[in-house]
Image (cartoon, coloured by chain):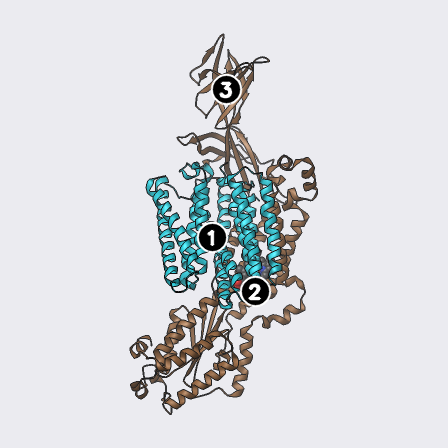
Chain colours: A cyan, B brown
Amino acid sequence: MSEMQMALTNTAGITSVMSFWVFAASNGFKQRKDLMVKIGSGAMVLAFVSLTAAIIIRGIDAQRFPLANLYESLLWFAWATMGSYLVLAKAYGVRQLGWLASLTALLMFLYGSWLPQSQHDIQPLVPALVSYWRWIHVPPLIVSYALFFLGGLAGFIQLYMAGRIQSLITAIVTVCLALLAVVLGTFTTVDTAWLQILFAGASLVGSVISFKLLQRVDKKIGDAKLAEIYDDVSYRCIAIGMPALTFGIITGGLWANHAWGTYWSWDPKESMALVTWLSYAAYIHLRVHRECSAERLALVSIVGLLLTLMTYLGFNSLGLGGLHSYGKFK
Amino acid sequence: MRRPTKQNTRQETRTHVNTESEKTDLKPQTSVKNVLASVKLTIFLMSLTALTVLIGAWCPQESANGKEKVVEQFGAETAKLLTQFGITDIYHSPWFLSLIAMLTVNMIACSFMRVFPRVKLLNKPLPFIGGREIGKLPVNTSVNITKGEKSAFTAIALKLASKGFKVSTNEERLLAEYGKYGRLAATVTHIGLLTLLVGVTITSWTGFSGFQPVLLNSHLDFHESEHSKLWIGKLPDWTVRVDETRREDHPTGEAKQWFSKLTVIDKNGKEVKTQEISVNNPLSYDGVDIYQSSWGLDHLILNFNGNERRLDLRPMGKLYAAFLPLDQDTMMLFSVRADGKPIKVFAKRPDWEGPRMLTELSKDKPAKLGPVTISLIKTMPVTGLQYKCDPGLPITYIAFGFIIVGVLMAAIPHRHVWVSFENNVLYFGGRSVKDKVGFERLLKAMETQIIRDFGEPKAEDVVETPSGAEAQMPLKSGSPASNSQAGDAKTQTNAEADAQKTSSSTKQNKKELAASATGSGNTENAQGDS
Ligand code: HEM
């Protein structure tokens, strides 16, 4: 890794930490709130710009499109999360999403920096990845994952604004347990079978409980108007994430057909992407159907976030590799 | 100035209801039919399918990994259980296939009963509606126009047009639509999905595929192809000869690319086509594609004091190795990194700590080990060729195109705006199903602008109202901006708003209207905008 690239990546990491704290702290101040939100956004813009530069320089250093292993894809994920947030903030003026977006980017940076050195180094590509299809197929997928994450995060805020506190807490615990499983699976030697059970069990039980708890409303908390806005933001994220995911899956099929002669081979990761796709298709139809309450839809978007996490990081870290094990390094 | 008559209003209300929920148009058709065409069923089936695929992603599939993998991962007992429930081959299980079948039926029913008929509605003109109906729209507001009159109407039309709306006007009413083609999303996507099913079905009934490791100078034929049970296709009678095959390395020794030079030989033995293939670069002939999918060294041929001997190679990390037991304890080991590279010769005995290297040999450099002269005749490469014939592919690709375009269209928000200018009040409102907030912001911005530019009377405005836009209209009797009338209109608006209590922006509007009565207008701006 060149020094320039290192410096830029670190700048992006540090500014996203700053952005997170300033955004989060802004809620504690009444008068300076606007100013702090501005500073937080500014830090995010800085993080976004330096990360963009870092990725470009990595590409130049490597003399290839810089999206070939887990570390690089994490950089892209953080990039897409911040970029999408900045666009959303401009279009909707949503602020609370800011600290969640920088937190997500931050976690991705941390996760990336804990990866072994071999991931940070620029390494030659295996024959299967030498193709222009790589940069057609992968970026839309990463972008769709980032948008689905933001959609789920907007769902969290929506639950808060709708006063569904108990349901919200359950959902947060669920996502944290799932993240824990992914982190343990990546960095420790805990038996992956247990981690699979942790991930799946937490997701299943947590989602069911959250759905049940939706009936408990704390009327003192929240803001119906903001809840509606976050509902809309969540839907926008998913409505745009969906074509990106579709495009990614289909171009993956075209690539596979080009390289191996079959566009679909029920490879685990492929299948998992299909699961995610079907779930968001179900979400879209739930919207069209118009019989599902906004809070339920928020929870569906959070379940979607869990599935996205599973597709993106879960499959490799929980020992369910398959063809797409470029993310594997143990 | 014409006011909507009572009768007129009633009629508008009816048409309005029709447009408001297009569902009602189709209700009679759908309610008669059964659950097959219900979206509830769709969601239920999709969730079940997702769950099934999830299980399939988690459990290694026999078709891809073989039975051993399942046993290795779960142990014999559990593996047996999983197999019994069809989980180890879930994508061919009756459960999965019937899910797909039900989804298909559901989709066909839905598509033909609900989705496709919508296309006809697309060009059905929507009515222009008056202030009262506009007040019932999900987002609506009204502004007291105190100056500029008709140019306020023109300004809003221009503003909408500049935001990408398609605007049509009818005297003092306006209807604007944005993202009309977004409404075709469902149709396009579903046509794509149905087409995909057709393509996949054609392939599974007439196509075939397979994999065959082929040694250098040997032939690939298609007799061991895989195809579905319902197959009605025919296998080719031509074969493919491997003329050359090699591996190219990165400087670090990892494989960079594999190449094979192939020649197609027809049934009469005639050579008809020669091409070098590599990963991502297949050969196509007669509807069959042949892909480079793996590569290896298969065996060595060595000469021991004049006797040729073939030794099978096994991949060991980056190397390939062959073993030759000499006696009970001693083992000879030959390792080679790549075709054409020298071969290292080792010996191994149990009482030695590791194998000892004895010598190296290559094609033109035989080695002498005691009384034995070993020379290398050749290393035999093997190329893994994947082939497939997929007649449904063009249709599948067309389907992919439709699906991508369809889901992209679904992201386009569809918006409608109605405007009516009555009694010096500009009513406007609309709806957007997919992008409520953005739409509200847009209307809010327009409201602010209209209030700023047209909401405040200025002495000279009252006197010389005519502007470019208004010249077309005969001047109305009684200056619209006379104070008493404006006041009337305002009370009327507020009364309506109170009665309807439809949206928060209406309430805010009241405040802003009141505020603007004391604020200042900007004539220059108003003219600039209109
Ligand atoms: C398999 C059975 C399916 C059925 C019965 C079904 C049914 C429907 C129905 C009734 C609508 C509403 C149409 C309208 O209100 O205009 C719809 C919309 C839609 N469907 Fe499906 N659908 C199915 C599968 C899928 C799948 C797998 C996708 C893939 C993403 C999909 C994508 C869409 C899209 C994009 C829309 C438009 C949504 C919008 O306008 O926001 N459908 N579907």
Between residues A275 and B307, which one lies in front from this camera angle? Answer: A275
- Whether ligand 1 has any atom under 8 Å from the Cβ at mark 2 is answered as no
First along the sequence among labels 1 and 2? 1
Label 3 crowd (10 A; few <14 / some 14-19 / many >=20):
many
Image point 42% across, 31% down: which residue? B249
Q: Check disc 1 and give the amino acid type.
A: Ala
Label 1 crowd (10 A; few <14 / some 14-19 / many >=20):
many
The residue indicated by pointer 3 is B334
The residue indicated by pointer 2 is A218
Local secondary structure at mark 1: helix
Chain letter of the residue beneath label 1 in the structure image: A
Q: Check disc 3 and give the amino acid type.
A: Phe
Say the numbered circle drawn on residue A146.
1
In-image side of A2 versus B182 (left or right): left
Residue B217: give x, y in percent of width and height.
50, 27
Picture quadrant of ligand 1: bottom right
Q: Residue furthest bottom?
A: B477
Q: CA distance from mark 1 to mark 3?
A: 51 Å
Residue A126: give x, y in percent of width and height.
45, 36
Label 2 crowd (10 A; few <14 / some 14-19 / many >=20):
some
- Is disc 1 in contact with disc 2, using a CB cutoff of under 8 Å? no
Local secondary structure at mark 2: loop
Quadrant that contains the N terminus of chain A: top left
In-image side of B485 versus A160 (left or right): left
